[in-house]
Structure formats: structure tokens, C-alpha cells
Amino acid sequence: MRKPPTIIDVASQAGVSKSTVSNVLQHKGTVNPELRQRVLDAMDMLDYRVHAGARVMRQQSNVIGVIAGDLGNPFNAELAAEVEAQSASKGFNVLLASTGGVPEQEYTKVRTLLEHRVAALIFLAEVGKSAIGLVGDDIPVVFISGSASRRLSITVDGVAGTRLAVEHLTALGHRKIGFISAMLADEPEVENERYMGFRKGMANAGLEISPRYLLREHGTRRAQQATYRDLVKAYLQQEDRPTAIVAALDQIALEIMSVANELDIRIPEDLSLVGFDDIAISSHDLISLTTIRQPLDEFASVAIEAVMRFKPEEKWSKTENVMLPPTIRIRRTTRALHCQEAV
């Protein structure tokens, strides 16, 4: 059986001293950027993992490390808050690290949490293989609202979610139904899943999907933000627009509502709208968005229970994907088609 690589092996592979590797691992800013990259490349090549040792320290730790994406995204922030609240109720403290949605930050943030000897890691965002590779099998690793091979993943059934949205709209008499998901371009698996549910819902209702009613622009989120509002505006200004829209995120639905207001398109009198996530603002009286609810409380409870069941003398080898059912929250942004036509 091959022995795991050591710091000495990494130093040799990178052509640097052992102390340089140590400085990189400790995140010291004194290392030349070029040398730092050589060390990181060597670690990836050798599949080197930060030594998880000090198992006794981990046994005594009551700190859970949480890796979040962009906390400017309301869904991410609310999920992080729910995980923290439920962790606290079970006697755990949370050390939260945000990547800000920047992939280059993933490796650094994971390494930093491991250096703090956290008892478990909960990921609220997808991360690259190099970052995941830092984590050994001596602590629980859970992914919420994402997917990862060889790890416990807790997700909502996105296909069922958008299918529910379509079923609600068709029950109200809508036949010309659109789908907008452009903000999800940097999360293709989630976007594809929600679009698949939309397609299934339309097929089950015997309805065709008009290409003109789809807005699935791809590219990075940052690149889209400059023109996203214009894309939505052009979509809503088309001559024969849909009578209802399924938005793949509540954030998208909120943008649609804003643009519709600018164009004097009334919701739901002129256009019915369904979102996805059920973020807090969606239930506000001034918004009252019909949406598909993601069960944040269940996400957090399943994750914390998995952490609590883990026995330190065991190895973490779960490969389970827990898929939770979505529910629809019917509010005031949808109405029967005949009511729209009568207005």
C-alpha cells in the first residue's frame, strides 16, 4: 500500500524547501506567488492532504466549519443562518467562511478551516476537486444544495419543483408558459435540473415549449449582470409574450417583477409568475411571490444529525444523496388566465 505523501515529498516535487511548503500551508504571505503556485501544483499532483492528525483535538472540538458561496445571495445567507442556528441548538459553534463565489478562494478557505481543527465541514456551495482533496476521511463532510461524489449530499428535487410550478399554472388555465434561468449560468447542474422539470411539466400537460419563451443565457454571473435587466426587458416586450413565467430562482422572479413594473405590466393581472427558493423577502406583503420552497430547516437538520452520528474512531465514507421534496407556496403573483383576460 502506497504511503501518503509528506511535506518533504511536496517540497521535492516543487523544488522548494520544507519551510516554504510549511509557510504555504500556514497561509503566510511571505511566500513568492510563483513559489506558492508551484507548491499548490505539487500538492495537487501528489494528492497531498493537509494532515488531519490530532484526532483527540477533533474529538474535543465542538466547532463545525461551514463553507458558503456568495453571501450576497439571499438564499445562501439564509441557508447559512439556518445551519448556524441548528448547530447552536445542538451545542456546536460555527466557523463560517465565504468564497464570495470566487473559485480561487475555495482552496484557501477549506485549508484555513482544517487548520482550526473543525469537527466537521458543511459545504453550502460547490467547490473544486483540489479543495475537496484537502479533506481526509476522519471528519464528516456534508454538501447541502449541491452534489459531490463520495460525499453525503442533501438536495431538493429540482425537477419535481419546476414541474409543480407548471402544474399550478396549467391548472389556472395557462398554456403559453415561459422559463427564465439566466442567473443560474454558473450552476449548470441546478439550471439543467430545473429546466428538465419545466419540460416534464409542459409535456405532461401536452404543451409545446416555444423557444421565444425561454431565456437561458449562459456565461458567468458577473458578465450577465450588466445586461441581465435588458435581457428581461426585451423578453417581456416581445409581441406575443407568455401569459405566465416560471423563474428558476426567486431572485430572477424579483427582477422580472421590477422590469414588469417599469413596463406597466401588471402581476398577476397581465402576467402570472412563479419563483423557486422561497427566500424571506418573497413572503413580504409587497412581494407575495408564488414560489417553490426549498426546505432549509430540513437541509440543516439532516446535516447536523449526520455530523452527530459520526464516531471519531470511524472513517467518513458516506456516498448518500438525500433528496428532499419541494412544496409550492401559492401567494399573489399567479391567477387564473380567464381572470387576466377579463381585466
Image: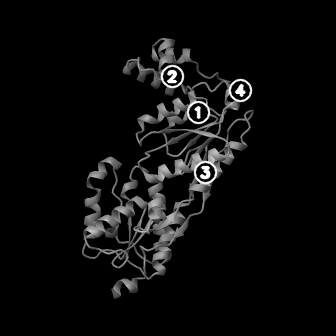
Distance between the Cα atoms at labels 2 and 1?
14 Å
Q: Position of residue 59 (x, y in %)?
A: 70, 31
User: In the rendered image, which residue does mark 4 sit on?
Assistant: 56
Give the mark, 3 or 4, whose residue is nearer the N terminus.
Answer: 4
Query: Residue 300's mark?
Result: 3
User: In the rendered image, which residue does mark 1 sit on?
Assistant: 135
Q: Amino acid at mark 4?
A: Val
Residue at image x 34%, y 69%? 213
Distance between the Cα atoms at labels 4 and 1?
17 Å
Q: Amino acid at mark 3?
A: Ala
- Marks 3 and 2: CB-CB under 8 Å? no
Give the mark, 3 or 2, whose residue is nearer the N terminus.
Answer: 2
Distance between the Cα atoms at labels 1 and 3?
21 Å
Distance between the Cα atoms at labels 3 and 2?
30 Å
| Mark 4 secondary-structure assignment | helix
- Marks 2 and 4: CB-CB under 8 Å? no
